[in-house]
Image (tube, rainbow, N blue to C red):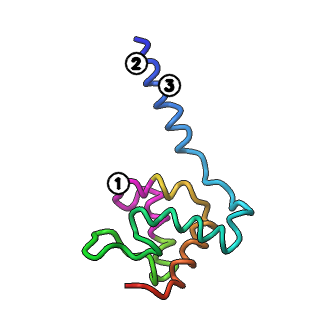
Amino acid sequence: MRMRLAMLAAAMVSEAFAQQPAPAFAATNATPKGVASMASACAMCHGSGGVPAPGSIVAPLAGRPAQDTIDAMKAFREGRREATVMHQIARGYSDAEVAAIAAYFAARKDAP
């Protein structure tokens, strides 16, 4: 019984956290280094600098028009686009942070 209550409580906390709005654009993220740091979080799946490994099914981000990235992140956030983890990741960024990351990748010259 205790285990079920603990699981229920954890699920409720998790759901409440997921419903929170994305944080405001932190001042430390508003710098070029801050934006590059946020963008580096994408490397695990999208490759270093937004260029995935050859043959990867993951979309490249480098050189992609900023509005395309913004639209994709909004669709992930709203559950309108299929995802494994992107729907959760997208909720972690404010609109301003998404726009800054999108601009960062759009400006990358090493696009595939």
The residue identified by callout 2 is 4
On residue 71, which mark appears?
A: none
In this picture, residue 45 sits left or right of residue 24: left
> Tag 2 or tag 1, which sits nearer the N-term?
2
Q: Which mark is residue 9?
A: 3
Helix, strand or loop at mark 3: helix
Name which residue type carries label 2.
Answer: Arg
Q: Is residue 66 left or right of residue 95?
A: left
Q: Can residue 49 be found in the magenta stretch?
A: no
Give the farthest residue toward the bottom.
109
> What is the quadrant of the N terminus in the image?
top left
- Residue 102 in percent (x, y) is at 54, 75
Occupied quadrant, residue 84: bottom left
User: Is 101 rendered above or below residue 15?
Assistant: below
User: In whole angstroms, how far apart are the C-alphas of marks 3 and 2?
Assistant: 9 Å
| Badge 3 or badge 1: first in the primary sequence | 3
- CB within 8 Å, label 1 to label 2: no
* Residue indicated by mark 1: 84
Amino acid found under the numbered disc labelled 3: Ala
Which residue corresponds to the image point at 58% horizontal and 64% vertical from the top-left? 38
Q: Residue at x 46, y 21 (%)?
A: 6
Label 3 Cα neighbours within 10 Å, binned few <14 / some 14-19 / many ≥20? few
| Residues rendered magenta in the picture | 72-87
Q: In the rendering, at what x and y percent does residue 50 appear?
A: 44, 74
Residue pictured at 65% horizontal, 54% vertical:
23
Horizontal side of 94 relative to 48 (left or right) equals: right
